[in-house]
Image (cartoon, coloured by chain):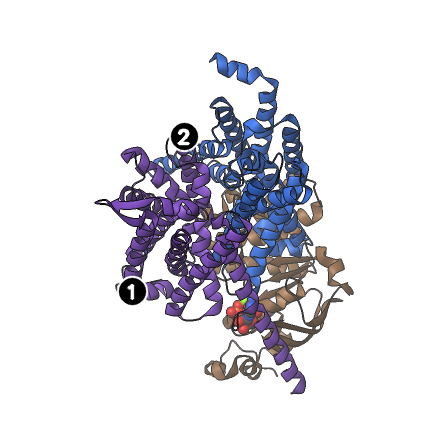
Chain colours: A brown, B blue, C purple
């Protein structure tokens, strides 16, 4: 089953092309790493798929239907710096926001929703921080709260923009375990990831991106020195025959 | 003392007090959203920009009619907000300068029109000056009814869509992601702010009404970490300021209402800054020891 | 004739003094702080009056500078205690301004210091209020005061031109090479207070904001050079005064209101027509670009 199809996507910022010729299809139940150098357009890719920024061209098809009709199937963990941390809201409240799409307009969250939000906080090990104002959490804890919000959203497809930035190794492992569980449940997850060392362990699929997709497919066939050189330019050559790479291709 | 009592029991005063408390509550509530959207000063500019609208309405229709004034005020207020955003979007001018430009030019235009009216227009034009600093004593029952109905409407709307406002301010990208029309909510919020300003200028005046949007929410922030409570507390603070300021102004003959309301709000702010239960200076100091 | 000449001189001095100071404010993204100070200065003037019982130039300058710096300090203090800066500005200036207005209402009609005056000033009265010394009429007080502040501000800008430039462009670098950035900030705030108080009589405490911000913003659209921007801003300020005065003369409206409107007019012109940063120029360049791309 195809979870997402991207056809001929292109994005420009003020006439400057940032993404061109993006075509790929993500199968259901996969965990994909989106990999590329700074400025490659990874964040732009996610934002344009979610229609958060205007596209020059391109269609986004989600489970066979246009994106706009399938919004409720999609969860998004944005880059963490994008919210106002002094906002008068606590961890539980943020997680509850994940339910807003289900609750619908005007209605307030009921006891069941609140209970569910608590459970989501518990899953990321943050239950005892439920009533903390969000600026009083550490960076990794904040990240976990936003992950819990994604969890509460109960979506089918997740986009995560650098969820591990500034997160300690233990939290990163915990989050990864959760993502892998989601995959087992048939959810589809796409993660922007910068640490090449862990790509092979974390993701079953890889999207190598630099302005346009360099390659997409199962990690073992895509995550090769040759492809990485094409993605990052020559700068990657020091990796040589490092064990972090797969030997296929 | 007797004087105060007779003042309080007069039906006109009671109307005025009801109006000022509703207005105070509405502006505190809406102001909480505006504050968190970091648009407090845009509210200030918009308020100043309502002056030319009021004057134009008088010039065009030639009568002193509060509903017409409000329409005029809302029109120029909205145009001003649009200008602020357009200037930032289409030129290298930054937001603060853009606000300053729009505020001062629209206000200058307003003053110019106002003097034109006082010098040229015949008939009963007195009362327009009251829009600058507000004059509760000069208000009649129908004026108050406009304030009361307008404020109630604003309170109801912002309570109904509380959840939607909250998320589109806190995390607009996420809100868009779950299919909320964030730009529509931004627009509605803008409209509500214009609403508060417009119904409030007669009582508080264009120069200082922004304070009613800024100060009570800021004071409320020292008492709670939750937006819902913050809105209610800000509303209560606004209502208290509105009532106290209006009372002093009506009792103390000729004192402009707006500045008095603002001073009450400022006093509440200082008290909150010191004693606030959540972020107040004293609480923080005690926690640290 | 000399009557209008004095008014024109006053207007031009206001435009030049506020214009050149304002250019710095716009560049340093402090327009709204200037807006705040030009409101709160009213409190300084009232305070000076309550202490000295006269509207004398020097106590007014001192009172204004004190309150101006106090405003900047309070905003700074709230800011560093975690209040977002726009709200900090909003709270401080509305409070102090409200206090000033209420105090004025208490003083009442005893002096020509009333609320309307505070807002609009009355440039038309400037020529009557002259300064006599040893029986010799030396011309309007306002012109003397404005002239003094103009020369003071000009001297400060010329003396510390380099420091202003670097602390505006890159405060981090400025600190690291030992430029007293904080002191410069407060010097500028004093300059704003002085300009405001000197212009207060003629254009009013609020409309002085237009003269402070709009010419600076206009010249920002027209030039890319730091010195050029300051000079151009002064020029635009003066031009706005002349335009506004002429218009007010013909239509018989508030001179200060007309001057503020004139600054807006010049700004609008620059916004659309500036050769480099104007809408029209941008639009034309975009069209050219598209044509090139089509041809290529
Ligand atoms: N709002 C914007 N306006 C103009 N250009 C932009 C904007 N946002 C991003 N860009 C440019 O688009 C390109 C892609 O940016 P994007 O944020 O998608 O990169 P990224 O792959 O996420 O990089 P990183 O690894 O650093 O997060 C960059 O060259 C960037 O400079
Ligand atoms: Mg990115």
Q: Nearer the viewer, mark 1 or mark 2?
A: 2
Rendering coords of residue C125 (x, y %): 40, 44
Rendering coords of residue B238 (x, y %): 53, 33
CA neighbours of label 1 inside 10 A, class few (<14), some (14 to 19), many (20+):
few
Rendering coords of residue B133 (x, y %): 51, 36
Residue that sits furthest to the top in the current view: B2
Q: Chain of mark 1?
A: C
Q: Which residue is mark 2?
A: C108
Q: Which residue is mark 1?
A: C158
Between B52 and B84, the one lying in front of the other is: B52
- Is residue B223 something one can see in this rendering? yes
Q: Chain of mark 2?
A: C
Q: Secondary structure at mark 1?
A: helix
Q: Residue at x 39, y 64 (%)?
A: C230
Instruction: Quadrant for the C terminus of chain B, please.
Output: top left
CA neighbours of label 2 inside 10 A, class few (<14), some (14 to 19), many (20+):
some
- Is residue A240 something one can see in this rendering? no
Q: Residue at x 50, y 56 (%)?
A: C246
Left or right, residue A144 beside residue B165: left
């Amino acid at each position: 089953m195809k979870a997402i199809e991207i056809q001929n996507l292109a994005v420009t910022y003020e006439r400057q092309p940032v993404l061109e010729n993006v075509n790929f299809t993500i199968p259901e139940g996969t965990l994909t790493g989106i990999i590329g150098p700074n400025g490659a357009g990874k964040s732009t890719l996610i934002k344009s798929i979610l229609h958060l920024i205007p596209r020059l061209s391109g269609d986004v098809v989600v489970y066979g239907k246009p994106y706009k009709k399938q919004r409720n199937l999609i969860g998004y963990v944005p880059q963490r710096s994008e919210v106002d941390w002094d906002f008068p809201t606590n961890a539980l409240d943020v997680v509850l926001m994940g339910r807003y799409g289900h609750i619908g307009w005007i209605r307030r969250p009921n006891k069941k929703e609140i209970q569910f939000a608590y459970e989501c906080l518990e899953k990321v090990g943050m239950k005892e921080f439920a009533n903390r104002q969000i600026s009083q959490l550490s960076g990794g804890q904040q990240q976990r709260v936003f992950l819990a919000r994604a969890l509460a959203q109960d979506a089918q497809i997740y986009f995560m923009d650098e969820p591990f930035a500034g997160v300690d190794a233990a939290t990163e492992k915990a989050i990864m375990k959760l993502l892998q569980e989601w995959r087992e449940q048939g959810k589809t997850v796409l993660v922007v990831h910068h640490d090449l060392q862990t790509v092979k362990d974390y993701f079953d699929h890889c999207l190598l991106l630099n302005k346009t997709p360099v390659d997409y497919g199962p990690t073992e066939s895509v995550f090769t020195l040759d492809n990485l050189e094409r993605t990052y330019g020559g700068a990657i050559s020091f990796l040589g025959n490092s064990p972090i790479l797969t030997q296929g291709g | 003392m007797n004087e105060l009592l007779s003042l309080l029991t007069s039906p006109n005063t009671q109307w005025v007090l009801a109006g000022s408390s509703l207005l105070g509550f509405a502006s505190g509530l809406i102001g909480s959203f505006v504050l968190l959207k970091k648009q407090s000063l845009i509210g200030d500019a918009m308020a100043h920009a309502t002056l030319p609208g009021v004057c134009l309405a008088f010039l065009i229709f030639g009568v002193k009619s509060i509903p017409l004034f409000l329409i005029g005020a809302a029109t120029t207020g909205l145009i001003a907000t649009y200008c602020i955003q357009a200037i930032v979007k289409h030129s290298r001018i930054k937001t603060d300068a853009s606000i300053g430009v729009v505020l001062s030019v629209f206000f200058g235009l307003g003053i110019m029109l106002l003097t034109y009216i006082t010098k040229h227009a015949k008939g009963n034009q007195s009362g327009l000056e009251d829009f600058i600093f507000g004059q509760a004593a000069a208000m009649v029952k129908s004026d108050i009814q406009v304030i009361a109905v307008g404020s109630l409407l604003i309170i109801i709307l912002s309570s109904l869509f509380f959840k939607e406002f909250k998320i589109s301010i806190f995390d607009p990208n996420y809100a868009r992601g779950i299919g909320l029309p964030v730009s529509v909510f931004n627009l509605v919020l803008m409209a509500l702010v214009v609403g508060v300003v417009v119904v409030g200028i007669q009582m508080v005046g264009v120069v200082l009404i922004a304070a009613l949007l800024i100060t009570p929410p800021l004071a409320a922030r020292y008492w709670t970490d939750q937006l819902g409570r913050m809105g209610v507390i800000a509303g209560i603070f606004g209502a208290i300021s509105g009532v106290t300021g209006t009372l002093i102004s009506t009792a103390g003959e000729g004192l402009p209402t707006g500045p008095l309301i603002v001073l009450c709000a400022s006093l509440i702010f200082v008290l909150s800054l010191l004693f606030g239960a959540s972020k107040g200076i004293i609480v923080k100091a005690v926690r640290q020891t | 004739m000399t009557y209008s000449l004095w008014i024109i001189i006053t207007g031009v001095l206001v435009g030049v003094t506020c214009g050149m100071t304002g250019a710095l404010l716009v560049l340093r993204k402090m327009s709204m702080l200037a807006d705040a100070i030009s409101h709160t200065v009213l409190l300084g003037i009232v305070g000076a009056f309550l202490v000295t019982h006269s509207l004398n130039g020097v106590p007014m300058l001192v009172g204004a500078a004190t309150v101006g710096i106090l405003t900047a300090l309070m905003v700074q203090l709230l800011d560093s205690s975690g209040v977002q800066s726009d709200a900090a500005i909003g709270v401080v200036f509305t409070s102090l301004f409200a206090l000033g207005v209420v105090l004025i209402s208490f003083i009442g009609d005893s002096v020509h210091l009333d609320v309307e005056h505070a807002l609009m000033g009355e440039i038309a009265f400037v020529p009557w209020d002259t300064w006599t010394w040893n029986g010799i009429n030396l011309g309007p007080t306002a012109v003397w005061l404005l002239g003094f502040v103009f020369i003071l501000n000009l001297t400060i800008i010329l003396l510390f031109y380099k420091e202003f430039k670097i602390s505006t462009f890159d405060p981090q670098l400025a600190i690291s090479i030992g430029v007293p950035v904080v002191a410069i900030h407060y010097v500028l705030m004093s300059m704003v207070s002085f300009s405001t108080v000197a212009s207060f009589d003629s254009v009013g405490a609020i409309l002085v904001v237009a003269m402070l911000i709009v010419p600076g913003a206009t010249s920002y659209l027209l030039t890319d050079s730091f010195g050029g921007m300051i000079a151009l801003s002064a020029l635009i300020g003066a031009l706005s005064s002349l335009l506004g005065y002429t218009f007010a003369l013909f239509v018989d409206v508030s001179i200060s209101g007309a001057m503020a409107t004139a600054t807006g007019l010049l700004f609008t012109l620059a916004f659309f027509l500036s050769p480099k940063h104007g809408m029209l120029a941008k639009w034309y360049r975009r069209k050219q670009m598209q044509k090139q791309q089509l041809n290529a």
